């Protein structure tokens, strides 16, 4: 529903409290005012359990009226208010963010809290609702998106003067959900274990696809070995590949937009350079030869030349069925990115380099891929001893990433 500006009231309210014995909520609180536009008398009432609660309700309406807010809006439920103000609540968001936010509102927020009056939504109610979602097994991103849209709707209510504090900003919420939307606490646990597992997955996906299109498997292998998102793989152009140094200049990604798919800047809006390891160079060379010399030609497309998204890849390859049959029930397309970053961290890629390859804005996000093995810990102790005694321990040879992947 489009946003409609509320009529400024800012007029005195008359009020009264009537006691009606024998009722579950025996105190009727009522306010009256003259609508300055129609000159008609309007009223609003609500039953309350005590006289104190009735007076508090009246005081809140008087405060709202003094700020120029129509008192009738204070009696709206959360669902009614949110649906009416959703356009304002979502302003500034990209379409690909809007869709999961709206899904969270429709499927989780409204069923759990939508029936409550807007002013009855408290910190405790939001707290219990969020933990109920978690207890029900909702994924991290699902809970985050649902809570994010609730925060936005309640923030709009604060701006409208209907409430004074946003109850959805639960204490500890920022700390619990401060990680990036597409990253989890332990991304290493989501990675494929080795090169053979990756090639087995790629082959199985091709086998299940229509006419066994090999491009799906090649896109999957490329995504894992470059730690890229599927939308970024779709955005690769011939001109982005440096065949002399085997470097990919990652400049764009394919994302859903109004009217269809569109190529936009990367998630961090910063181009980055990604190494192309030996294992995938022959495949890249074949694809470059197949698409010709057009610098704007896409390296990876669907069987009909269309752009790739994570949803298209899932449906075209029967992803869910394939990963389940291989024993990877929880493997998502985004976990190909976790796989690449985990392998690079295990291969000894320095943290600052790994961060640039990943395009992480926060160094802590990259650090979660580091997992020092026993030899690294032992060598750390040897280095400290050498520093204290003056006897330096020669560093071990550092294998390249490709050699490490071959041993995995």
Image: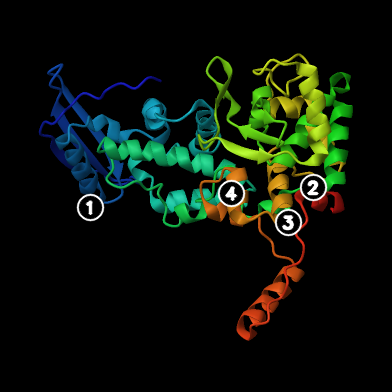
Q: Residues within 10 Å of mark 1 (few under 14, many from 20)?
A: few
Residue 157 percent coordinates (x, y): 32, 37
Label 2 secondary element: helix
Q: In which quarter of the image is residue 84?
A: top left
Q: Name the residue under label 4.
A: 355
Q: Distance between the residues labelled 2 and 4?
A: 19 Å
N-term-proximal mark, 2 vs 1: 1
Q: How far apart are marks 3 and 4 (CA)?
A: 14 Å
Image point (61%, 33%), residue name: 250
N-term-proximal mark, 3 vs 1: 1
Q: Name the residue under label 2.
A: 402
Q: In this view, does 344 lie to the left or right of 165?
A: right
Residue 309 percent coordinates (x, y): 67, 26
Of circles 2 and 4, the one toward us is 2
N-term-proximal mark, 3 vs 2: 3
The N terminus lies in quadrant: top left
Along the viewing direction, whichever of 79 and 143 lies nearer the viewer = 143
Q: Is residue 208 left or right of residue 359?
A: right
Label drawn at residue 52: 1
Verify CB contact (< 8 Å) between mark 3 and mark 2: no
Q: How far apart are marks 2 and 1 (CA)?
A: 73 Å
């Amino acid at each position: 529903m489009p946003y409609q500006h509320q009529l400024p009231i800012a007029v005195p309210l008359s009020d009264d409290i009537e006691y009606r014995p024998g009722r579950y909520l025996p105190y009727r609180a009522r306010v009256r005012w003259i609508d300055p536009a129609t000159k008609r008398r309007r009223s609003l009432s609500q039953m309350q359990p005590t006289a104190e609660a009735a007076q508090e309700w009246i005081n809140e309406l008087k405060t709202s009226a003094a700020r120029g807010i129509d008192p009738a809006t204070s009696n709206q439920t959360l669902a009614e208010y949110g649906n009416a103000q959703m356009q304002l609540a979502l302003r500034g968001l990209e379409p690909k963010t809007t869709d999961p936010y709206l899904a969270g509102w429709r499927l989780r927020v409204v069923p759990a809290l939508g029936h409550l009056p807007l002013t009855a939504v408290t910190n405790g109610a939001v707290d219990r609702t969020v933990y109920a979602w978690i207890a029900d097994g909702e994924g991290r991103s699902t809970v985050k998106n649902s809570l994010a849209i609730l925060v936005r709707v309640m923030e709009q209510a604060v701006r409208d003067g209907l409430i004074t504090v946003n109850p959805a900003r639960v204490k500890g919420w920022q700390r619990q959900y401060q990680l990036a939307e597409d990253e989890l606490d332990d991304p290493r646990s989501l990675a494929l274990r080795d090169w053979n597992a990756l090639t087995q997955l790629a082959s199985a996906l091709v086998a299940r696809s229509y006419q066994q299109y090999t491009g799906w498997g090649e896109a999957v292998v490329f995504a894992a070995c470059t730690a890229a998102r599927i939308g970024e793989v779709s955005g690769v152009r011939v001109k982005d590949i440096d065949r002399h140094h085997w470097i990919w200049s990652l400049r764009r990604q394919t994302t859903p937009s109004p009217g269809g798919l569109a190529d936009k800047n990367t998630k961090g809006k910063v181009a980055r350079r990604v190494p192309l390891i030996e294992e995938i160079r022959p495949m890249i060379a074949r694809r470059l030869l197949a698409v010709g010399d057009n610098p704007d030609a896409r390296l990876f497309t669907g069987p009909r030349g269309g752009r790739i998204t994570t949803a298209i890849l899932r449906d075209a390859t029967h992803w869910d069925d394939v990963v389940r049959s291989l024993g990877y029930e929880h493997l998502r397309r985004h976990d190909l990115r976790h796989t690449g970053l985990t392998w690079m961290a295990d291969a000894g890629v320095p943290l600052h380099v790994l961060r640039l390859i990943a395009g992480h804005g926060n160094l802590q996000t990259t650090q979660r891929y580091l997992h020092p093995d026993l030899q690294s810990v032992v060598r750390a102790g040897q280095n400290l001893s050498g520093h204290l005694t003056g006897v330096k321990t020669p560093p071990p040879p550092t294998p390249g990433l490709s050699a490490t992947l071959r041993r995995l």
